[in-house]
């Protein structure tokens, strides 16, 4: 499901880590016909202030990648991305992220319309 955005305003992305994993993340954006560009990266120990990108035209995409480790093998990785514009969550803008227990990473792409 794409996230509906207003192409006249920047996107503000927050990450909510919801599991006991040590994790690193990277967020990238791609405009139509362009290459991916990183706009945020760090770990769960960094300042988790909102990350901003854009404005972006419709047809752009966001990509997330999480690498994670845990001493508790039985628990899956969980996080959520929330995309806002002007302080309001965009329609479709809460994206749950789940990684399998025993694996060490998860990535995905988010379409913007």
Image: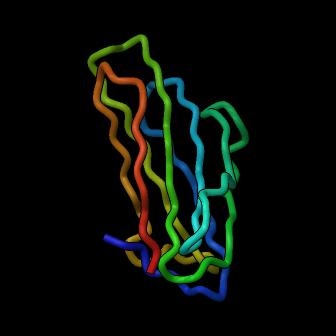
The quadrant in which residue 37 appears is bottom right
The residue nearer to you, when weighing 92 against 29, is 29
The residue nearer to you, when weighing 80 against 61, is 61
Give x and y (percent) for residue 52.
Answer: 69, 64
Q: Is residue 3 left or right of residue 6?
A: left
Give x and y (percent) for residue 40.
Answer: 68, 50
Give the residue at x 58% y 32%: 24
Q: Is residue 50 left or right of residue 96?
A: right
Name the residue furthest front: 33
Give the residue at x 48% y 55%: 81
Q: Is residue 97 above or below residue 71?
A: below
Q: Is residue 9 above or below residue 96?
A: below
Q: Is residue 7 above or below residue 73?
A: below
Q: Is residue 39 above or below residue 107?
A: below
Give x and y (percent) for residue 94.
Answer: 41, 63
Give the residue at x 70% y 52%: 49
Q: Is residue 27 left or right of residue 18?
A: right
Give x and y (percent) for residue 103.
Answer: 34, 23
């Amino acid at each position: 499901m794409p996230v509906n955005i207003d192409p006249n305003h920047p996107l503000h992305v927050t990450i909510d880590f919801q599991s006991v994993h040590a994790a690193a993340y990277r967020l990238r954006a791609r405009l139509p016909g362009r290459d991916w560009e990183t706009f945020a990266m760090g770990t769960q120990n960094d300042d988790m202030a909102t990350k901003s990108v854009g404005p972006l035209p419709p047809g752009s995409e966001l990509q997330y990648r999480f690498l994670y480790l845990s001493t508790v093998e039985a628990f899956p990785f969980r996080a959520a991305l929330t995309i806002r514009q002007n302080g309001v969550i965009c329609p479709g803008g809460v994206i749950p992220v789940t990684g399998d227990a025993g694996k060490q990473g998860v990535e995905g792409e988010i379409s913007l319309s």
